[in-house]
Amino acid sequence: MRVEELKELLNAVNLNEGAALDGEITCGYSCDLLSWVLAHGKQGMAWCTVQTHVNVIAVSVLMEMACVIMVEGVQPEEASLKKAMEEGMPILSTSKTAYEVCGLMSKAGVGVPVE
């Protein structure tokens, strides 16, 4: 699944309009503990979080994730959006919960991270 397809599936908004949405999603994840995400993040991951600060973007870029999904309608801090624009990281925003998003991704065939 590509980020654009996930955006449509979630009825989400891409907050970083300049980011390419053709990235391939290799797995899905939901976690709000950054150190845990650093330990378990994967290239191509679609990461659900309610965290809004700039370190979310730093972690997603470092791990070469496909996108960040901000759930429950949370919005990134201005510095986070600016960094995402600089790095080309897609940020999807949805009113759905992380539980709903992960369920939809799973049903669509997006798997769990493989260690």
Image (cartoon, grey):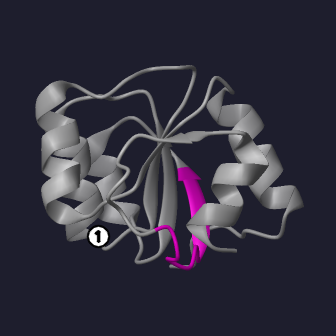
Identified at 63% across, 73% down, the residue is 2
Q: Position of residue 45 (x, y in %)?
A: 49, 67
Range of the magenta residues? 21-29
Q: Nearer the viewer, residue 6 or 33?
A: 6
Q: Nearer the viewer, residue 6 or 104?
A: 6
Q: Residue flagged by tag 1: what amino acid is it?
A: Met
Above or below, 78 relative to 65? above
Q: Residue 8, how many percent across, how many down?
A: 72, 51
At mark 1, the secondary structure is loop
Q: Is residue 78 magenta?
A: no
- Residue 24 drawn in magenta: yes
Q: Main secondary structure of the magenta part?
A: loop
Residue closer to the observer: 57 or 38: 57
Which residue is under mark 1? 63
Q: Is residue 73 above or below residue 16?
A: above
Query: Left of 15 or right of it: where is 2?
Result: right
